[in-house]
Image (spheres, rainbow, N blue to C red):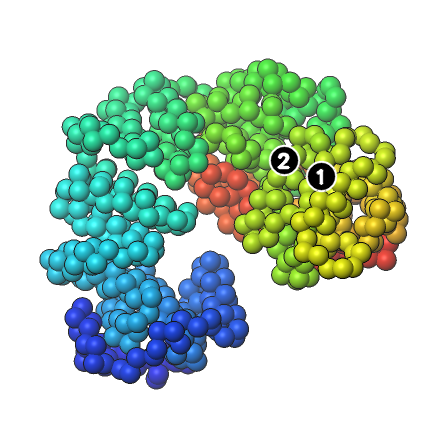
Amino acid sequence: MKKYGCWLAILPVIALVVNCSTVQRSGPALIPRSQLHQPPPPQAKALWDQAAKQQKQGNLRAAMASWEQIAQSYPNNAIAADSFYQLGAAYMQAGQMDRALQYFDYVIYAYPQWENVDLARVGQLRVLWAKGEKKRAEREAGDLVESSPQNPEVRVQLAQLMIDIAKDKRDVDKGFDWAQQGFNAATTEQHRKMLTEATVGLLNQADETSINRLLQTNPNAFMRLFLDYRTARIRLERDPTDSNRQVLYSLLQQNPTHPLAMEIQASLRGMPSGVSLPLHADRIGCLIPLNGPYRHYGSSVLRGITLAEAEWNQAHPDQQIQVVIRDTRAEPEMAKKSFEDLAKNEGVLAIIGPLGVKSAKAVFPSANNWNMPLLALSQKDEEASSNPYVLHVFLDNRDLVETLVSFCREKMGYTKYATLYPNDRYGQRLSKIFSDVLRDQGFSLLASVPYQPNSTDFKEPIRKLMDAAKKNSPPSGLDVTPFEILFIPDQVREVALIAPQLPYYNVVGATLLGTNLWGEAPLPKEGGAYVENAIFATSFSVDAQSRETQEFRRKYESLYRSPPGYLEAQAYDALMILLQARYLLSPASIERTALLQRLLELRDYRGVTGICSFSPDGKMQKQYVLLQVKNGRIVQINP
């Protein structure tokens, strides 16, 4: 702030001279609208992106410095007006209302021709409301409503303000009507989150009579959930029985993607369970297949868990723990019985596992009904219902693919993509995710062709791929491969069979792209020169140079005489993360719901599988490692 303090010192003077609620159009010489809204210079755009990144990381001071630099350096472009607005919003967020008002006033005074100037007007009204000038704020908000701004951001923020005004006046009906209007205008997740918080706050002051009156207005299904949720909360608070708790859980299960889902999950986490379970705070349960077709995977998890347990107990002699293992055989019914044994008979604090989607889904209901934190060794299924007591500690396919595509786009400049995938559940899912991520990042697939699993001859799929890609590409007059990237979400064995066949059908020069499956076998050895420059993503590389990974590798190899794999690393991290959250609780406050809350609050934990946190819906967010085949060796290229 000091660097630009002198220049920004003029703003208080301007704010005193100009009453911006009734802007004097005879103010500064206006920049022609067409000139103001020209695309910002590349340097300004780079600074803006930097500010957005700093704001996302929570470094608001640095973001404000970037906005100040933009406003000073590019005053004749709309990006300056937006920067002034962002500064006002930042000061308002920090509670410095007078300073915020100066920035909003200046935007309205100096940039009345800015297409988003109504955002500053809404900010101005919010500040006036917060400063106690409520009648003026309400009156001028009404005037702004009459002008019917079409900008979705303005309409959403205006609706949020009007909800707060209605809440202050205890006019639930009018506030709920504004909430409906706001959601109709909402276009982003942030919009919906803002409006959800405002609507829940409004309805928290409503009794059953008020809610029933609103239900009579026949709201749509989206808005009705707010009313059903409030009704369920009222009844549960009045009569905290399992049947009333189940109503709340049913609302969550039926509406997992509704923006209210996070609020419902938080409510369920705070509601006591009707099931009485013993509690031994020094016991952690673990569900893994020790017998049956997946025992090999269970053994890998067990090795990681055992290493973490021994390491923790050695480092914390006064807080030693015991891991209680139960076999699931990878059978859902067995997993459910083993879960009940750990909860009812062993009284464990929390449970890690089970391994696999089917077994995990079999125990989710019990985890939620009994308030038992469960760190599932499975991905969060995008189509699955929300489960408030379940955290997913495996890698996430969508996040992994987003990392791959972002790198190819930003670092390598690739714009042309194709997919060749196995026609099984994994291949279908990954090809769809790849297509969705490309669309979100402004691209589309030139071609996407399946092949039968366990094939050895890929002649027909490759030909179909090339035909489709050429058809969807602009004619060039050259016989070249129409795509730059070929995504193959399959095992190394299949990739090693596909890669040598590609040149025979004129697929030349395309970079092969893969998932973490490519890290489970020696890709350069299997694929030879045909996989040179291939890139894949994973959350664990035994050769990663981080201190945590190298220390883990040293201890693991010392104990087991072989290098660790992904399952061992993920199991190790899962237990260590759980124990770190437990460590943050005082001995007297160690209980299951408090532990879950500590886990959800965990940010940027540096584990052997990278830096990770949990999102509010229980999905692990982590940093993925990008690896590339270079000169017959796998090397890390990012981060």
Q: Viewed as shown, does residue 502 lie left or right of 622? A: right
- Spot occupied by residue 417 in the image (x, y as percentages of width and height): 68, 51
Tell me what residue is drawn at x 44 percent, y 23 percent: 370
Rendered position, 396 above or below 92: above
Crowd around label 1: few <14 · some 14–19 · many ≥20 (10 Å): some
Residue 281 seen in the figure: no
Residue 177: horizontal and vertical position, in percent?
22, 41
Point 47% across, 38% down: residue: 617
In front of the other: 71 or 626: 71
Q: Which residue is mark 1?
A: 449
Which circle's residue, 1 or 2, is located before the other in the chain? 2
Q: Nearer the viewer, residue 255 or 619?
A: 255
Place of residue 393 in the rendered image (x, y in percent of width and height, measured from the top left): 58, 38
Q: Quadrant of the N terminus?
A: bottom left
**Residue with the mark numbered 2:** 429
Cα separation, mark 1 vs mark 2, equals 13 Å
Q: From what the image shows, is residue 45 above or below residue 7? A: above
Which image quarter: residue 578?
top right
Q: Determine the residue positioned at 17% across, 29% down.
A: 213
Which amino acid type corresponds to the residue marked 2 in the rendered image? Arg
Relative vertical location of residue 526 with respect to residue 476 in this rendering, above or below: above
Image: 566 above or below 605: above
| Front one among 385 and 392 | 385
Can residue 177 be seen? yes
Q: Secondary structure at mark 2?
A: helix
